[in-house]
Image (cartoon, rainbow, N blue to C red):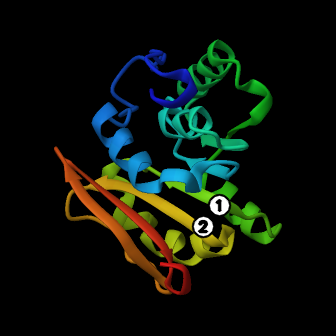
Amino acid sequence: MAGQHRSRRLVTPPGKGVRPTSDRAREAIFASLGAAVIDARVLDLFAGSGALGLEALSRGASSCHFVERNAEALEAVRTNLETLGESEHARVERGNAMTVLQRLADAGEQFELVLVDPPYDAVPDLAAMLTTLLPQVLTPTGSIVFETAAGSAVPIPGLVERYNRRIAAAEIVILQRMETA
């Protein structure tokens, strides 16, 4: 981690069901985002251990809504939040990311930063829903960060790619609305 929680280690759930974003990828993402993270409301879909959302909080985000369906992963998120003293800035929700995303879109909730790190093999099946729903929960000046398998990025109409970098087997893409890119 960087930011105010620099050098702190995160708890990760046991097993192979969660693939935490590497330190190198997190550094690349947040270096690219820069000051846009400060005071941002963040949505961390497919949160896993919560590494991306926790990094955003460490770098000054005002709040983070973590969404994860795996109970062990959610317990890791809660433990990490407690250890870092960030529980008051977080909402942790167990559920299917697409169901929660649909509910947030229907409720008109919006975020300055949306972090999307689905299981790599699920991206083709999720692409249509992500393409439809993500723009609905993004503020006019917000950013979406996608982490997918290299070559699997999901283009979203109305958003432009501001950043694209391959790190090992992952592709990191940052998208923004056309008028703010």
The x, y position of residue 63, in whole percent, is 72, 42
Residue at figure coordinates x 52%, y 35% from the top left: 55
The x, y position of residue 70, in whole percent, is 55, 32
Q: Which residue is mark 1?
A: 112
The image quadrant of residue 109 is: bottom right
The x, y position of residue 13, in whole percent, is 46, 20
Look at the numbered discs 1 and 2 and tell me whether their residues touch, using CB distance below 8 Å: yes
Residue at figure coordinates x 32%, y 51% from the top left: 120
- Viewed as shown, does residue 165 lie left or right of 45? left
Residue at figure coordinates x 38%, y 77% from the top left: 155
Measured Cα–Cα span from mark 1 to mark 2: 4 Å
Residue at figure coordinates x 65%, y 61% from the top left: 112
Q: Is residue 177 above or below residue 99?
A: below
Viewer can see residue 154: no
Q: Amino acid at mark 2?
A: Gly
Q: Amino acid at mark 1?
A: Glu
